[in-house]
Each structure stands twice: as structure tokens, then as C-alpha cells.
């Protein structure tokens, strides 16, 4: 080969960007391109001096793989492609894309192996970053799925809890649509248990619920007031259903993640029918006589004070009628307490038919009764006492085949003519009652406590 051709070939070899090399069957380098120094930091001379090119160039953890590629390349005419890590002189590594191809010379000569290698470090780093990104995305996805599963579990547990409690729960979003309704809410408002209200407009709920109510207009006005005034927490509102149930509702604005941002309104419904019934029974036990169902002495004093305050404010009058039965003890002694109870019940029923709606009858104990009469005067109270005396005397009772009866001694007083307060009025009526008893019973007497009266009126 001429000197000019050698010079040209040398310049071509120096311009090769990748690594080109020629190895013999013992893995010794016969020739390597100058680019090896740029890639590994080793000069071509250093590489050619090595007894084993694979030992020198390939990273120890990839070396076994490199030897298999070398051996396969020598034995197979098909080229081999593989990615290997080359070791640098400074101890670092660089990824290379290698191509192994057998080169046959003259017949009978040992085959040679051509190695072409291209640095792919940047590509590998990009791949690693991409793999790390994909791995991070997968971890994030797995984490999201984990928390979603936990969230679903929590939601199922919460739904089960809300369906077990007896409070009706309804959540309406800002678009006036239902986002949640529990089983108790469906039951209270008469929906089948499997009804799905999610997405239903508030107007539809109003239209279906109004016919169930005693006063639908008042309920709808209440709803409009709460929403229009943006009440953070509404006061309890009592809803009466046509079937006799009593339900209260309360509501509260539900805030979102952003400050002062509401995402809807939560309504709570509570059926208080049974608790109201029990409460009324307890009140009745506290202020009613269990035998006659008349108001008792405790309620008598409360009503007397209330009427006197009202009369003072209006410059009105209040009459007090004290009634004590004549002949009750002999019936009790002769026929037993059950007969006495029957007399008391019969008297209560009889007197109820005589008095007016605004007049209140009380059993103070034993055979003592009292009657409060608002807005009366001497004449009206005297007429009432006459009706009472005659009506009670006419009540028939039969025990063991014998007809018996009772009469009443009655004492009366009027506020403010005979007393200025409750205690004085009771004392005045008791004094008049004592006069009726001492003067022969079965009669009525009007108090004469006040100076200037003509004297006790009786009949």
C-alpha cells in the first residue's frame, strides 16, 4: 500500500466517532480506532498491549456476557447486537451499543472478530429517568388505589352507620340537587327503602312531601326562609304529618376545602312522635289527677297565678269556686273505696257538662274541687254556683241495688273584690265554703271579706 493511501486511511480511522476494533480468536486486539480514548480514557496503544480486550474494556459485572457474545460471534456468521457497559480508566462506566461480526480471511486462517461500538450513555440515562418516572407513577397509582380502596371502605362504613341511626339525613348541594339521603330520611318522608334520590332536585322533594303535611305552606315558607337568609345553622322547626307523626328539622351549611366556600346544606330530621307522647304523659302525670283526669292542685296554683296576672294587666276579674262534697264519706264507708272513686269520676264528668269552655275544673284532693272562672262578676258567679249545686245533687249513683247521691257545699270569691292576690283569694273562698257547711250544707256562699259589702250572699 502506498504512503498516500496509508495516510488517508489513518485520517479516516481518526475521524471515526464510534469505536471500531478487530480482535483475534484469543480476544486480543489487532487494531482499535483512536476514538477509544475519548470513550474510555485509554489510548489505543494501551488497549493493544492488553492480553484480553474483554478483560480490559468490559465492566466486570458484564464481562461474562461479553465473553459469550465474543464466542458466539466467532462461531456464528450472523452478527450479534448487545448493550454492554465499558469500564473507563477512572473507574466509571459507560453504556455502549455493540455489534459483533465475524470476519473471515483466507481459507484455513483463524477467523477474526470485528467490534463496532457506539456510546449510548445519554440514552441510557434518559431511559433510567423514564423508568424511574414510570415507577414513580406506578407507585403513585398504587397509592391512589390504596387510598381509594380505604376511602371506599370508609364510605361504606359511614353509609352503614348513617343507615342505622334513626335521624334522617339529607344533603343538598348548591345546585339544589340531592347528594345523599339515608334510610331514615326515606322512611320519614314515605319513600320506599330502595329509592335512589341522588341527583333529584329539591323542588321534586317539596312537591312529593307537601301532601303529607298538615300545614305544607308553613313548612315550605320555613325552607325558603332558611335558604334565602343563608342561615349557618337553622333553628329546630316542627313538622306535623297528616298521619299524626311529629318531626323536627334542623340544617347547617357545609363548608368546603376553601375558606368561606360552602358546598351545600345538610338537613337533619328527627321523628319525635314517641318522645312527645311520653313527654305529654309525664306532664299529665305531674299535673293531672290520675282518677278523674282533672288538673291537680299543682296545676291549680299555676293557673290561678297566670289568670291573676292576666286579669291585673287587663283590669279584669277572676272568680274562684271551692266545692266540697256532702255525704261522700258515708258512701265510701258503706260501699268501699271503689264506690267512692266512682262518685268522684261521675262528679267530674257531670261538672264538665255544666261549666263553660274557658272555666277550669281542678281536683285538689279527696272530695275537694275548685273552679277558676275568668272575666266574671258576682251575678255570673252566683248563677254558676246555683247550676253546680243543682247539677251535683241530681247526679244518680247506684251501689248494691241502692240509689244514693251527694250534694255540694260551695264557697266563692272574686279577684280583686275580695282579695288582692292568690293566697288571699283562696282564703276568702275557703271562708265562704266553711259558712256553707256550717249553715246547713248543699248551698253556696259568696265571700264577704271585704269591708263595705252588704254581708255574705248565699243560696
Image (cartoon, rainbow, N blue to C red):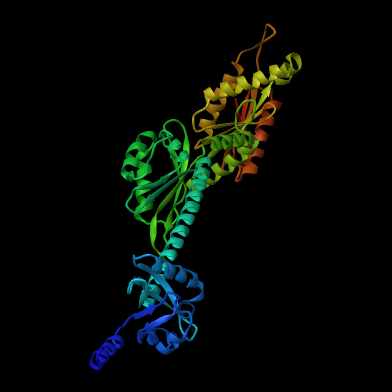
Q: Inspect this view and state whether residue 220 appears.
A: yes
In the rendered image, residue 408, in percent from the top left (x then y), is placed at: 64, 23
Q: Inspect this view and state whether residue 311 appears.
A: no
- Placement of the N terminus among the 4 image quadrants: bottom left
Q: Residue at x 51, y 75 (%)?
A: 60
Q: Does residue 49 appear left or right of residue 392 in this picture?
A: left
Vertical position of residue 226 compared to residue 284: above or below: below
Q: Quadrant of residue 111?
A: bottom left
Vertical position of residue 455 compared to residue 145: above or below: above
Q: Residue furthest bottom?
A: 3
Number of on-image labels: 0
In the rendered image, residue 70, in percent from the top left (x then y), is placed at: 42, 71
Q: Nearer the viewer, residue 77 or 333?
A: 77
In the rendered image, residue 127, in percent from the top left (x then y), is placed at: 38, 70
Vertical position of residue 385 compared to residue 428: above or below: above
Q: Residue furthest top?
A: 401
Q: Residue furthest front?
A: 108
Q: Nearer the viewer, residue 414 or 439?
A: 414
Q: Quadrant of residue 402?
A: top right
Q: Nearer the viewer, residue 341 or 88?
A: 88
- Placement of the C terminus among the 4 image quadrants: top right
Q: Residue furthest right?
A: 333
Vertical position of residue 318 compared to residue 88: above or below: above
In the rendered image, residue 52, in percent from the top left (x then y), is placed at: 48, 79
Q: Residue at x 63, y 34 (%)?
A: 285
Amino acid at each position: 500500500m502506498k504512503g498516500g493511501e496509508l495516510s488517508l486511511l489513518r485520517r479516516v480511522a481518526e475521524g471515526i466517532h464510534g469505536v471500531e476494533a478487530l480482535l483475534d480468536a484469543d480476544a486480543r486486539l489487532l487494531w482499535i480506532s483512536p476514538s477509544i480514548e475519548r470513550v474510555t480514557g485509554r489510548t489505543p496503544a494501551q488497549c493493544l498491549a492488553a492480553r484480553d480486550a474483554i478483560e480490559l474494556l468490559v465492566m466486570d459485572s458484564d464481562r461474562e456476557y461479553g465473553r459469550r457474545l465474543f464466542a458466539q460471534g466467532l462461531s456464528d456468521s450472523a452478527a450479534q447486537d448487545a448493550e454492554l457497559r465499558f469500564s473507563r480508566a477512572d473507574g466509571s462506566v459507560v453504556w455502549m451499543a455493540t455489534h459483533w461480526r465475524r470476519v473471515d480471511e483466507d481459507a484455513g486462517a483463524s477467523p477474526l472478530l470485528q467490534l463496532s461500538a457506539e456510546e449510548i450513555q445519554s440514552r441510557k440515562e434518559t431511559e433510567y429517568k423514564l423508568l424511574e418516572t414510570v415507577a414513580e407513577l406506578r407507585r403513585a397509582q398504587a397509592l391512589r388505589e390504596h387510598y381509594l380502596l380505604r376511602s371506599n371502605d370508609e364510605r361504606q362504613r359511614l353509609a352503614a352507620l348513617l343507615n342505622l341511626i334513626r335521624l334522617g339525613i339529607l344533603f343538598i348541594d348548591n345546585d339544589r340537587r340531592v347528594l345523599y339521603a339515608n334510610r331514615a330520611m326515606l322512611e320519614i318522608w314515605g319513600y320506599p327503602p330502595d329509592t335512589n334520590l341522588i341527583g333529584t332536585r329539591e323542588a321534586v322533594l317539596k312537591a312529593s312531601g307537601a301532601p303529607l303535611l298538615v300545614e305544607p305552606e308553613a313548612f315550605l315558607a320555613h325552607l325558603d326562609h332558611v335558604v334565602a337568609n343563608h342561615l349557618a345553622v337553622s333553628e329546630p322547626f316542627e313538622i306535623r304529618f297528616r298521619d299524626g307523626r311529629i318531626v323536627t328539622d334542623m340544617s347547617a351549611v357545609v363548608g368546603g376545602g376553601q375558606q368561606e366556600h360552602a358546598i351545600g346544606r345538610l338537613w337533619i330530621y328527627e321523628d319525635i312522635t314517641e318522645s312527645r307522647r311520653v313527654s305529654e304523659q309525664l306532664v299529665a302525670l305531674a299535673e293531672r289527677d290520675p282518677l278523674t283526669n282533672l288538673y291537680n292542685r299543682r296545676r291549680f296554683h299555676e293557673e290561678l297565678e297566670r289568670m291573676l296576672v292576666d286579669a291585673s294587666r287587663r283590669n279584669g276579674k277572676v272568680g274562684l269556686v271551692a266545692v266540697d262534697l256532702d255525704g261522700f264519706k258515708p258512701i265510701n264507708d258503706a260501699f268501699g273505696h271503689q264506690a267512692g272513686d266512682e262518685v268522684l269520676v261521675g262528679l267530674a264528668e257531670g261538672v264538665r257538662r255544666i261549666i263553660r269552655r274557658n272555666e277550669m275544673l281542678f281536683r285538689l284532693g279527696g272530695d275537694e274541687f275548685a273552679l277558676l272562672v275568668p272575666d266574671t262578676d258576682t251575678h255570673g258567679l252566683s248563677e254558676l254556683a246555683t247550676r253546680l249545686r243543682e247539677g251535683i245533687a241530681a247526679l244518680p249513683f247506684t251501689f248494691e241495688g241502692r240509689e244514693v247521691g251527694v250534694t255540694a257545699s260551695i264557697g266563692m270569691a272574686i279577684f280583686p273584690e275580695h282579695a288582692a292576690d292568690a293566697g288571699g283569694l283562696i282564703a276568702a273562698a275557703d271562708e265562704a265554703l266553711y259558712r256553707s257547711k256550717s249553715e246547713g250544707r248543699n248551698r253556696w256562699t259568696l265571700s264577704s271579706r271585704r269591708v263595705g259589702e252588704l254581708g255574705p250572699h248565699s243560696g
